[in-house]
Image (cartoon, coloured by chain):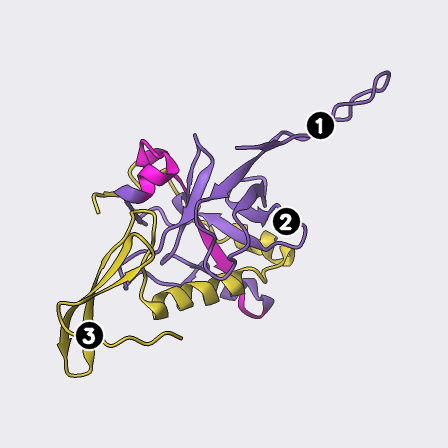
Chain colours: A purple, B yellow
Amino acid sequence: MAALTAPAAAPGTTAPSAPPSVRVLYFAEPLPGFPGHRDYVLVPGDTAGLLFWLQSVAPDGPRFLTVSARDFFPDYRPVVPLVVRSELGLDDVDQAQVLCLVSVPGGDPTEATANLRAPVVVAPSTHCARQVIQSDPDLPLRRRLRR
Amino acid sequence: MLTLTRSVGETIRIGDDIEVHVVEVRGGTVRLGFKAPREVTIHREEVYRQIAEANALAAQVTADSLGALAAFAPVTAEPAADQVQDAQA
């Protein structure tokens, strides 16, 4: 996978404090509704590591706010089928980064919900990802974030 | 849209490696079986549409919400070592 890095400083100049390289996440299958986008970057949305922007690398591509499922929903256990683990190169499912897309109806954060029916599963070692639609119909599309 | 008539036990082939089998017809319901490469995902249309609609809503979120949302995380959250389930399917 490609990595986006800051350009080197010109000779004779002082290098600015370069941001860390950002790995491109490759989606083997585009997110439903966004068929033209397979390459994304994951950008921290806060300093605590709870929120992330899943941002398409395309200039006009989509951007999704996601939450770390591990932190927001400790009891959440999405299923990752064998075929998906193989596709992502996910040898150890415990190492997967699981993110849930967030919606904020009307722009009101108190009404914000997370999609537990179709989490985004990221394999940290390969930087491959997929939105994995769960077969359990009881998993909510819109789980309130506010307790 | 292509329309085909098939009976129980008959098959439709899509491309070289996707088969759709008519398993059962009862009343107004049809049971279908699929043979496809592992990388081909198959979903009920209404489920896929729900996810696509939810994704479209999620793509409208702005940075204005960030500060409030982080506060909704459980303060006592502990890392869950076995958060993701294996599935042999």
Q: Which residues are magenta?
A: A84-106
Which is nearer the eye, A10 or B19? B19
Query: Please, which chain is the residue tagged with disc 1 on?
Result: A
**Residue under pointer 3:** B30
Identified by mark 1, the residue type is Ala
Looking at the image, which residue is at 27% across and 58% down? A135
Element type at mark 2: loop
Q: Give the quarter of the image for residue B22.
A: bottom left
**Residue under pointer 2:** A58
Identified by mark 3, the residue type is Val
Looking at the image, which residue is at 57% across and 66% down? A108
Res. A122 in view = yes
- Specify whether residue A8 is painted magenta: no
- Say left or right for A58 vs B20: right
Query: Please, which chain is the residue tagged with disc 2 on?
Result: A
Gap in Å between the C-alphas at discs 1 and 3?
59 Å
Of the residues tagged 2 and 3, which is closer to the observer? Answer: 3
Element type at mark 3: strand
**Residue under pointer 1:** A18
Which is nearer the eye, A36 or A99? A36
Query: Please, which chain is the residue tagged with disc 3 on?
Result: B
Res. A142 in view = no
- Specify whether residue A90 is painted magenta: yes
